[in-house]
Image: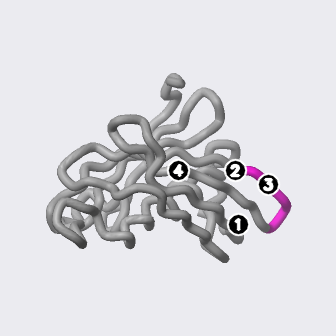
């Protein structure tokens, strides 16, 4: 299902995931969707590789970042600091293509929030799922 993008979130300069000046980073872009979810897009490169043609499992940092940012869809003054992250790898993620990640908040309290998300392959299949818990921090 496709949703309209409502807003692009800001990126930093040096972050491994979103840093626009980090030559080895993912340079992910984040978009708030009309259904309240957050989507990210990055283009996997050869230097993100583990086995030939596959992205390293550590690339799941994109899920951590996307779920952690999802809270700011409803409150732009808050950011998430990871307490726990549980991953399920289902399919290999290829290199040299656009990869989409989608995340949502599933529980929100005064100090903490929980969320989940998926890495979605170009053919629409889900490659990785994640559940995570975060401590709320002011931006």
If you read the primary sequence from the N terminus, does the residue marked by circle 1 or circle 3 appear first? 3
Nearest to viewer (mark 1 / mark 4): 4
Task: Please say whether residue 109 is one of the residues in the magenta stretch.
Answer: yes
Residue 114 left/right relative to 26: right
- CB atoms at circles 2 and 1 under 8 Å apart? no
If you read the primary sequence from the N terminus, does the residue marked by circle 1 or circle 4 appear first? 4
- Residue at the spot 18% in from the left edge and 58% down from the top edge: 45
Q: State the extent of the magenta-drawn residues as a range.
A: 106-111
Q: Which residue is mark 2?
A: 105
The answer to whether 124 is drawn above or below residue 117 in the figure is above
Q: Which mark is residue 107?
A: 3
Q: Secondary structure at mark 3?
A: strand
Gap in angstroms between the C-alphas marked 1 and 4: 21 Å
If you read the primary sequence from the N terminus, does the residue marked by circle 2 or circle 4 appear first? 2
Percent position of residue 54, x then y: 25, 62
Q: Which residue is mark 1?
A: 136
Nearest to viewer (mark 3 / mark 4): 4
Could you say which is closer to the camera, residue 75 or residue 99? Answer: 99
């Amino acid at each position: 299902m496709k949703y309209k993008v409502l807003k692009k979130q800001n990126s930093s300069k040096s972050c491994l995931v979103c840093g626009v000046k980090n030559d080895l980073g993912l340079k992910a872009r984040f978009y708030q969707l009309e259904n309240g979810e957050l989507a990210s897009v990055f283009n996997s490169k050869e230097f993100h590789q583990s086995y030939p043609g596959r992205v390293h499992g550590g690339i799941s940092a994109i899920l951590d970042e996307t779920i952690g940012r999802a809270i700011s869809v409803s409150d732009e003054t808050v950011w998430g600091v990871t307490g726990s992250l549980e991953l399920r790898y289902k399919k290999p993620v290829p290199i040299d293509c656009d990869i989409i990640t989608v995340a949502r908040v599933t529980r929100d309290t005064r100090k903490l929030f929980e969320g989940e998300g998926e890495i979605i392959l170009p053919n629409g299949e889900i490659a990785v799922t994640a559940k995570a818990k975060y401590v709320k921090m002011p931006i």
